[in-house]
Image (cartoon, rainbow, N blue to C red):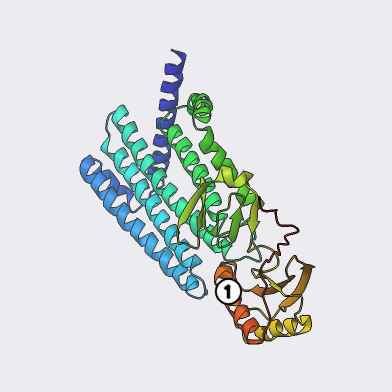
Amino acid sequence: MADEGSKKESVDTSSQVAEEMLSDMKSNLPDAIVPLWQSLESNPWLLAASVVVVGFVIAKLAQWIFRSVLGKLASKTSNDFDDKFYQILAKSIYAIVFNIALLLAVEALKFSSSVDTFLKRFVITLLILSLMGKLLKVTRIILEAFSQKENRFKFIDERTIPILDITTKILIVGAALYVMFISWGINPTAWLASAGIIGIAVGFAAKDTLANLFAGFFIVADSPYKLGDYIILDTGERGRVTHVGIRSTRLLTRDDVEITIPNSVMGNAKIVNESGGPWEKTRLRINVGVSYDSDLEKVHDVLMAMVADNADLCSSPEPRVRYRNFGGSSIDLQFMAWIERPEQKGLISHKLIMQIHKLFNENNIEIPYSKQDLYVKEWPSSPE
């Protein structure tokens, strides 16, 4: 009984507030319009239609004036952010003015108390939904505009936009629903308490989804990789990051196969970011061995001469040759060079191995293979 009484009191209060607001608006009409209003009050439907038509004209006029004034200012700027912003703002002004006209029309029709309250709340709900949609668009273009100013807003970029976008959507939609409940005379406190209990149950049922969700937030905050980076996981997957979402991260491998990995796995994996560090360049290492009879100075000069004619290798840092150890059949060395992008590693390694083999053959440099000599100390005696 107490809940029904409070709900009825809330309905009466909201209806009274709406009536007082409309009465104030009616009393503040211009003196030239008051006689016309009074003459039309004898025919409520004609009065309501007139109010809607006049409201539509005023709303369109206000929208046109707003666009004309701000359109000239926006045309003087180099970006399109203000163009999109003022267009949404102009539509919002139109929605507010026209919905006020609808409220006045409902008031003029003099319906019963229950019907009058329902219609007014329905119009207010339409206005809330309209403004909510426009506010969602505004936040989206604001995030995009801020992401383009990397020097000023480093925390907003291509990888953080999805997280910030969904967060603002949740806040805006939640606020709109709260105001909508209030406008209908519904006390949202009990709903919020029920939502808390339901949330606990959903949390247990969807713990994997929530783990991916929170891991997605941590990945964005910690930033171990970003869109476009080449990464290698401890499980062996290697590819370019094409998407960092709330639930998963997607990698495009060199086979043009897209791998979707849950964020909870990414959050606990050992990740090698080949695009990280001071630049995206990656060092390539080619292991090769030469015979012990080779002229090591000549080997070094042949490999370094190969660099001058190779456009695939970076000139800075310079390529280098390093002898590593005395192997069982060869002197082992590494040819090390930097390449521009990690995804080129396989193709350039292929080219270098072919070129080194050709140069060594042309310069009589032997690449030995493992050999073993077998000494027979004593032949077994033949049976008599």
Please state which of residues 20 and 228 is positioned toward the viewer in this rendering.
228
Q: The N terminus appears in which quarter of the rendering?
A: top left
Residue at horizontal 43 percent and vertical 31 percent from the top: 14
Q: Nearer the viewer, residue 111 or 214?
A: 214
Taking the view exactly as shown, the residue that stands out farthest to the top is: 1
Q: Which residue is mark 1?
A: 348
Question: Measuring 59% from the left and 69% from the top, which residue is drawn there?
Answer: 345
In the image, residue 368 sits, relative to residue 106, either above or below, namely: below
**Residue 293 at x, y = what percent?**
76, 79
Q: Position of residue 209 (x, y in %)?
A: 51, 38
Q: Position of residue 256 (x, y in %)?
A: 45, 61
Q: Residue at x 54, y 26 (%)?
A: 200
Going by the picture, which residue comes out furthest to the front? 384
Instruction: Tell me, yes or no, if residue 364 can be seen here.
Output: yes
Judged left or right of residue 181, residue 284 is right
Task: Specify whether 47 is left or right of 32.
Answer: left
The x, y position of residue 54, in whole percent, is 29, 54
Quarter of the figure with residue 117? top left
- Which residue type carries mark 1? Ile
How many numbered marks appear? 1
Element type at mark 1: helix
Drawn side of residue 308 relative to residue 52, left or right:
right
**Vertical relation: 375 (above or below) 10:** below
Instruction: Quadrant for residue 17, please give it.
Output: top left
- Residue nearer the viewer, 61 or 217: 217
| Whether residue 30 is visible | no
Mark 1 crowdedness (10 Å alpha carbons): few <14, some 14-19, many ≥20: some
